[in-house]
């Protein structure tokens, strides 16, 4: 297995403007983190045969023959025996799993299986601790810990009973309802109760509550593995404590049911869970970040592509958590998502020269280029340079098929008028929203947004520099970029649709941005976007007219000053993550390619003030974009000279997020609002002061967002401060959300593979 090193850029600000764009960047080996092969967490759930039939995963005959189907999902106890056989106590009797198949165990009784009873009743015979006893455990010296309704007790080998009152500094507990006790390999005693978790080491007690990161405290059990990882069962999920801290495992990504009734650990450190919906297993496999990337690439190529052009986006399945009946549908942002995926492949090729990465990047380019080509000569007249949102193939039944998107009530004139009246007074009412292309093989979606343009412009320079090699390949990129940019310039920086009016969101005009109060909150971001577009156009075409436009917009309309505050927001957690994603792509390109010293200075500072609000989100894409431009950049103002390097921890957070990404990309639900390690944000507004701000948002006690393995998101525009994430397991997200930052980190030298 290869080792990975994470290294920070360490060179002076002026060097940023001269960085090579055609090959992998080599950075100074400072702030290195060796990653190498790491333990990738994985899970497996065993459900009842009835459940598998009910959801459509199997027929009754298949379920009856299945090696993994349980006779019953109601599991009350679990234990690991010789040879790592797993025994589960169900309402229909004792089950056994031999590593390949579940079956009824008729040769043994539950009382014969060590570990199925959490209480050593024989050792407690004649000893009264008062109240119900929930758990007991012995250490190597014969000392027994007892968790009971009335407290925590130690029974010495001579039978004497001592009630324990753990103390940690100024805190002293009298625990009650102690549901779990256990000794680790060092002889340290652990317990769990509604008050929290405690561990007794040689130097005294350490107590954990939500303030120390404990996620939840309605405990049911406790188990300690051979590697001293401590697992806790709760009424809502499982919790693991190890050297890296606390980890919360809730929802079907990790467990078949939330009510964890018992836990057992096998010799390999795999944790087995008895739940109300079946048996769960969580373990670890050795993996590298590159191997994880290969896993996502394979899934994307198999499931997440749409049309002959291979647009990359979320797929849907008929059966939750199963690759059965996978279908693909268009989205409003096919161009954006495919562009971000494609940019990742460009970075991959720039870093590795892998021909597969080049092939995928080329495919992404052709898909994006087609969105500029498909409107030409079609059912309606579009100006050159208009970009479609997405496309839908016309089926064999023809344009009058019920699959015609214009028949959707949302896209009829009445439906559009209804939307304008109820949601957005600037919503456009025009028809058709889905015109046909010239040869009537595709409908293409109009009213293209600024999200789409930001994605296209983010992708094209990466493809031009890192993948396109021949003059013919490069000229195809120049043609697309020139057409779009000239369209915007010709129309006073507005993307004009076939109705002769700008699309709803692609209006970057000086008149509206600087003088229309309805657009004030768009002023900064759209000024940034246009400056970035023009910078990209100048870089790719070499045409100085785009540089002259930059100077004109700065001098006459203060677009550079507008972009100093790229988004109206009111602190951490108050922003719109779609805007964040867009802004950071634009910052990256502008600062990477600009040759305007004033713009570089001003917009690097702007990027810094923007990024510090994103820092707690643990976002490797945002972090790598900023670090690639801001590390060791020195900014001067009347108050001195300031180093705008990213804050300490950005690199560790980025790598940790990449490692935490689950291999399972189904959109399972995650619930976190009941947790005790979270604080609710005070009432906030998002962009407009009149917004209610009453949405529940949470932040961990450590001041950061929930980690990537405790929530689900398809793209980096998902709100990381929401406590709960809906999903049924029928959505199959693509892995581009991982691939882009991973490959970007490789290309920029933050991640170095030996």
Image: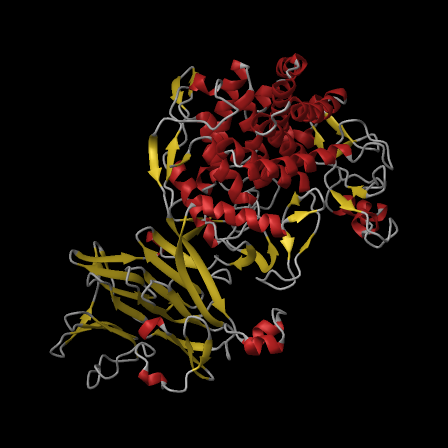
Could you say which is closer to the camera, residue 720 or residue 118? 118
Q: Is residue 299 left or right of residue 488?
A: left
User: Residue 381: horizontal and vertical position, in percent?
Assistant: 86, 31
Whether residue 716 is visible: yes
Query: Is residue 80 depicted above or below 190 in this figure?
Result: below
Give the colour scheme shown: secondary structure
Q: Up-down: is 593 above or below 107?
A: above
Q: Position of residue 689 (x, y in %)?
A: 59, 38
Residue 484 placement (x, y as % from top left)? 72, 26
In this view, the residue in front, 31 or 719, is: 31
Q: Residue at x 42, y 22 (%)?
A: 633
| In-front residue for pair 585/216 | 585
| Residue at figure coordinates x 62%, y 70% from the top left | 55
Check the image and name the residue furthest to the left.
Answer: 158
Percent x, y of residue 435: 83, 40
* Left or right position of 252 against 647: right
Q: Which residue is depicted at the point 59% across and 46% down? A: 692
Residue shown at 85% from the left, 39% from the top? 439
Q: Quadrant of the C terminus?
A: top left
Left or right: where 466 falls relative to 423: left
Observer-nearest residue: 470 or 532?
470
Give the total of numbered labels. 0
Q: Is residue 682 visible?
A: no
Residue 206 versus residue 657 in the image, above or below: below
């Amino acid at each position: 297995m290869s080792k990975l090193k994470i290294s920070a850029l360490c060179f002076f600000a002026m060097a940023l403007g001269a960085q090579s764009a055609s090959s992998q960047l080599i950075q100074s080996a400072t702030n290195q983190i060796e990653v190498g092969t790491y333990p990738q967490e994985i899970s497996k759930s065993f459900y009842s045969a009835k459940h598998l039939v009910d959801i459509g995963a199997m027929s009754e005959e298949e379920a009856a023959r299945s090696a993994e189907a349980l006779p019953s999902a109601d599991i009350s106890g679990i234990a690991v025996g010789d040879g790592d056989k797993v025994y589960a106590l169900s309402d229909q009797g004792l089950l056994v799993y031999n590593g390949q198949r579940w079956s009824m165990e008729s040769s043994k009784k539950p009382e014969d299986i060590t570990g199925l009873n959490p209480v050593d009743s024989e050792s407690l015979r004649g000893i009264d601790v008062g109240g119900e006893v929930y758990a007991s455990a012995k250490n190597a010296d014969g000392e027994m810990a007892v968790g009971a309704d009335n407290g925590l007790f130690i029974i010495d080998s001579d039978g004497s009973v001592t009630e324990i009152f753990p103390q940690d500094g100024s805190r002293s507990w009298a625990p009650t309802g102690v549901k779990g006790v256990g000794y680790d390999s060092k002889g340290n005693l652990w317990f769990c109760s509604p008050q929290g978790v405690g561990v007794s080491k040689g130097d005294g007690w350490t107590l954990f509550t939500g303030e120390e990161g404990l996620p939840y405290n309605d405990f049911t059990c406790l188990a300690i593995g051979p590697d001293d990882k401590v697992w806790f069962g709760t009424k809502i999920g499982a919790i693991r404590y190890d050297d890296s801290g606390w980890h919360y495992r809730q929802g079907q990504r990790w467990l078949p049911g939330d009510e964890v009734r018992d836990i057992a650990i096998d010799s390999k450190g795999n944790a087995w869970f008895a739940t109300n919906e079946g048996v769960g297993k969580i373990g670890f496999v050795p993996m590298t970040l590159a191997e994880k990337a290969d896993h996502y690439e394979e899934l994307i190529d198999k499931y997440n592509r749409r049309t002959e052009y291979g647009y990359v986006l979320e797929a849907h399945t008929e059966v939750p958590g199963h690759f059965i009946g996978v279908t693909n549908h268009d989205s409003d942002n096919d161009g954006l998502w495919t562009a971000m995926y494609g940019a990742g492949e460009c970075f991959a090729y720039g870093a590795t020269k892998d021909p597969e990465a080049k092939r995928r990047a080329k495919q992404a380019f052709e898909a994006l280029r087609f969105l500029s080509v498909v409107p030409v000569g079609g059912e309606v007249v579009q100006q050159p340079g208009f970009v479609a949102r997405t496309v839908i193939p016309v089926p064999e039944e023809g344009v009058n098929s019920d699959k015609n998107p214009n028949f959707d009530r949302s896209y009829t004139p009445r439906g559009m008028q209804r939307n304008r009246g109820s949601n957005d007074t600037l919503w456009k009412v025009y028809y058709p929203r889905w015109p046909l292309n010239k040869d009537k093989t595709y409908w293409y979606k109009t009213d293209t947004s600024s999200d789409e343009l930001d994605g296209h412009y983010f992708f094209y320079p990466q493809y031009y520099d890192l993948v396109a090699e021949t003059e013919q390949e490069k000229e195809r990129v120049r043609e697309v970029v020139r057409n779009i940019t000239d369209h915007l310039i010709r129309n006073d920086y507005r993307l004009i649709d076939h109705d002769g009016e700008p699309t709803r969101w692609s209006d970057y005009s000086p008149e509206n941005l600087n003088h229309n109060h309805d657009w004030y909150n768009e002023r900064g971001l759209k000024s940034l976007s246009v400056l970035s577009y023009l910078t990209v156009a100048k870089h790719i075409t070499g045409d100085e007219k785009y540089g002259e436009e930059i100077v004109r917009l700065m001098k006459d309309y203060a677009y550079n000053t507008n972009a100093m505050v790229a988004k109206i927001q009111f602190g951490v957690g108050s922003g719109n993550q779609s805007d964040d994603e867009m802004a950071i792509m634009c910052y990256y390109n502008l600062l990477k390619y600009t040759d305007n010293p004033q713009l570089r200075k001003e917009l690097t500072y702007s990027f810094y003030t923007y990024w510090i609000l994103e820092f707690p989100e643990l976002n490797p894409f945002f972090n790598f974009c900023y670090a690639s431009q801001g590390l060791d950049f020195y900014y001067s103002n009347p108050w001195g000279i300031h180093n705008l390097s990213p804050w300490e921890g950005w690199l560790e957070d980025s790598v940790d997020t990449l490692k935490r990404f689950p291999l399972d990309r189904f959109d399972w639900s995650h619930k976190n609002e009941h947790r005790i390690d979270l604080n609710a944000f005070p009432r906030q507004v998002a962009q407009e002061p009149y917004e209610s701000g009453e949405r529940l948002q949470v932040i961990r006690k450590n001041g950061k967002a929930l980690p990537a393995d405790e929530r689900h998101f398809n793209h980096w525009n998902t709100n990381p401060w929401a406590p709960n994430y809906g999903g049924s397991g029928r959505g199959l997200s693509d892995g581009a959300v991982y691939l882009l930052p991973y490959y970007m980190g490789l290309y920029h030298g933050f991640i170095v593979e030996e």
